[in-house]
C-alpha cells in the first residue's frame, strides 16, 4: 500500500510537544501518514495566568500552522493541543476547530472534543481526571462538567514549564491514574498531548478494571474515525481495540 493512500493527517502541535508525534507514529495504520506544523507558544505554566497566556498565543499561531499544512493538501487536521481547546470552556473547542478548518481547508478534530467523544463512546460519565498541569485543573474540570461529565476527583503534577511535561516518565502517568481512581469513577481521563501514556494504557485498564482515556489516544482515534479509517488494534486501550 502506498504512503498516504488511505489518508494524510495534518498535526497542529504546540512547539514544545515532543510526545504526540512518536505516539501517533507508533500506531498509524498502514496507508495513513501524519505531517506536522508547529505553533509557537510560551513555555511557562507556573501559574494560571501564564498558562492562559500560553494557550492564547498558541491558538493564535495555530492558524498559521493550519495554513502551512494546507499546502500539503492533508485530508484532515488534528488540533493536538488539549489545553488550547478547553481553556475557554465548552464551545471554544468547536470554535478553535472551525478556525483551523477555515485556515487549513480541511476538517479538524480538536483534542478536548475528541476526549469527550471518546468518554461518551464508552458510556462514561463519572470521571477521575489527571493532568500534568495542576494550575489549570480548575479550567479543565469546568470544561468537562460543561460537557456533561461528573469529575469525581482531579489531580495534577506541579511543573514549571510545558517542556517539563514532555520529559515525564511513564511512571508519572501510572501514578496519576492510580491517584484519581476512586470508587465513584467509572473511567479515567488523563489530559495533555505532551504527556506519554499509550504504552501503559492496557496495563492500567487491567489493573483498575476501568477504561482509561488519554489525550493522544482519543485524538488519534477520533481523527482516524473521522477519516473513515476503522482499523482496530490491541495495545493502547479499549477505545482503539473495541471502537
Image (cartoon, helix red, strand yellow):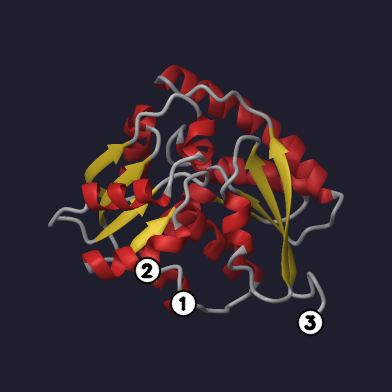
Q: Quadrant of residue 15?
A: top right
Which residue lies under the disc numbered 3? 1
Q: Quadrant of residue 183?
A: bottom left
Q: Is residue 184 left or right of residue 82?
A: left
Task: Please say if the residues under marks 2 and 1 sit with CB atoms less than 8 Å apart.
Answer: yes
Can I make out residue 109 in this image? no
Quadrant of the frame with the N terminus: bottom right
Kindly state the secondary structure of the residue where label 2 is placed: helix
Q: Percent from the top left, x then y, of residue 44? A: 51, 22
Can I make out residue 115 in this image? yes
Q: Percent from the top left, x then y, of residue 9? A: 71, 59
Which residue lies under the disc numbered 1? 234
Which residue lies under the disc numbered 2? 202
At 29% from the left edge and 62% from the top edge, which residue is drawn?
A: 124
Nearer-the-camera pick, 164 or 52: 164
| Mark 1 burial class by Cα count in 10 Å: few <14, some 14-19, many 20+ | few
Q: Percent from the top left, x then y, of residue 21? A: 63, 53
> Quick one: which residue is furthest to the left in this view?
183
Q: Percent from the top left, x then y, of residue 72? A: 85, 54
CA–CA distance in space, label 1 to label 3 = 22 Å
Nearer-the-camera pick, 80 or 169: 169
At 70% from the left edge and 48% from the top edge, which residue is drawn?
A: 101
Closer to the chain start, of discs 2 and 3, is 3
Placement of 146 over or under 138, stated as above or below? below
At 46% from the left edge and 32% from the top edge, which residue is drawn?
A: 88
CA–CA distance in space, label 2 to label 1 = 8 Å
Q: Which mark is residue 139?
A: none
> Quick one: which residue is furthest to the bottom in this view?
1
Kindly state the secondary structure of the residue where label 1 is placed: loop
CA–CA distance in space, label 2 to label 3 = 29 Å
Kindly state the secondary structure of the residue where label 3 is placed: loop
Quadrant of the frame with the C terminus: bottom left
Amino acid at each position: 500500500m502506498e504512503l498516504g493512500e488511505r489518508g494524510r493527517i495534518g498535526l497542529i502541535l504546540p512547539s514544545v510537544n515532543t510526545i504526540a508525534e512518536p505516539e501517533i507514529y507508533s500506531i498509524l495504520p498502514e496507508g495513513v501518514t501524519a505531517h506536522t506544523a508547529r505553533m509557537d507558544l510560551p513555555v511557562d505554566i507556573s501559574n494560571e495566568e501564564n498558562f492562559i497566556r500560553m494557550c492564547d498565543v498558541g491558538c493564535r499561531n495555530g492558524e498559521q500552522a493550519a495554513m502551512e499544512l494546507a499546502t500539503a493538501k492533508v485530508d484532515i487536521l488534528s488540533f493536538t493541543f488539549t489545553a488550547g481547546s478547553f481553556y475557554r470552556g465548552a464551545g471554544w473547542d468547536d470554535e478553535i476547530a472551525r478556525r483551523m478548518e477555515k485556515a487549513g481547508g480541511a476538517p479538524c478534530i480538536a483534542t478536548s472534543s475528541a476526549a469527550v467523544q471518546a468518554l461518551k463512546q464508552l458510556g462514561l460519565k463519572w470521571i477521575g481526571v489527571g493532568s500534568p498541569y495542576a494550575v489549570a485543573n480548575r479550567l479543565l474540570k469546568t470544561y468537562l462538567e460543561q460537557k456533561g461529565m461528573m469529575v469525581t476527583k482531579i489531580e495534577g503534577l506541579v511543573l514549571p514549564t510545558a517542556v517539563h511535561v514532555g520529559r515525564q516518565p511513564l511512571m508519572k502517568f501510572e501514578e496519576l491514574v492510580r491517584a484519581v481512581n476512586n470508587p465513584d469513577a467509572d473511567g479515567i481521563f488523563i489530559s495533555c498531548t505532551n504527556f506519554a501514556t499509550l504504552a501503559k494504557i492496557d496495563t492500567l485498564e487491567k489493573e483498575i478494571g476501568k477504561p482509561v482515556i488519554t489525550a493522544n489516544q482519543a485524538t488519534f482515534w477520533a481523527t482516524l474515525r473521522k477519516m473513515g479509517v476503522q482499523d482496530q488494534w490491541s495495545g493502547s486501550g479499549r477505545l482503539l481495540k473495541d471502537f
